[in-house]
Image (tube, rainbow, N blue to C red):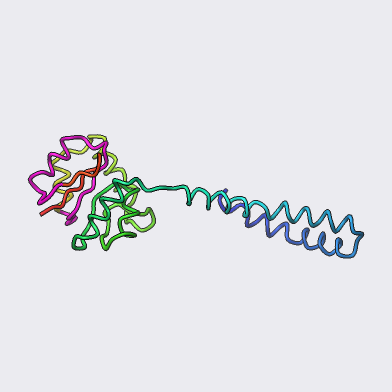
Amino acid sequence: MFHLHLPLCIVGAPVLHDLLAAATRGPRWKQGAVAVLLAALAQSPLAVTWRSIGAALNYQVPTPVMDAIQRLAHEPAGRVYTTPHIGTLVPAYSAHRTYVGHWFLTPDYSARQAQFNGLVEGHVAPAEFIALLERERIRYVLLPPATPPAITETLEPLARERVRFDKYTLALLR
């Protein structure tokens, strides 16, 4: 369905061409009707653009997340383990890379996202989480408020520093 408009445009182009040619030779009311038709056909991209701009301007990154990212920006570049959503923001505001970032820039995104969601839902054992951190050479971990206490406690011996930003936990690993 995503690309359905392409064959429809190809099929409809000759019809639109004939309609426009007839309208330029026809009476004023016909020219006006064609102008209204073209305005109706072209309004959708304008309306979508208007709504998208409004949504973008109204979007606010939560203050604790931005505070944590600003704190990370002062640390040496490394890999950050965080939520997929926050993972899209970290590289934009710092020199860090993320383990789970934007869907088309992250290798095996679905599996990594599922793994993170499993961690937050309490389905990943702390030992498995530690193994992931070591295997992937992750230097920083930014966990959301919903993270089980067992996971945040697991980070305690690994962290050289642990900082709280409201309900988010940033661990700077050794």
Q: Nearer the viewer, residue 145 or 119?
A: 145
Q: Nearer the viewer, residue 61 or 31?
A: 61
Residue 156's x, y, as percent? 10, 43
Residue 143's x, y, as percent? 24, 44
Q: Is residue 148 magenta?
A: yes
Q: Nearer the viewer, residue 59 or 101?
A: 59
Residue 38 lies, with reference to residue 121, above or below; the image says below
Residue 15's x, y, as percent? 78, 58
Q: Quadrant of the C terminus?
A: bottom left
| 116 lies left or right of 26 | left
Residue 21 lies, with reference to residue 147, above or below; the image says below
Q: Residue at x 20, y 38 (%)?
A: 124
Q: Residue at x 23, y 48 (%)?
A: 142
Residue 38 lies, with reference to residue 118, above or below; the image says below
Residue 20's x, y, as percent? 81, 62
- Residue range (magenta): 135-162
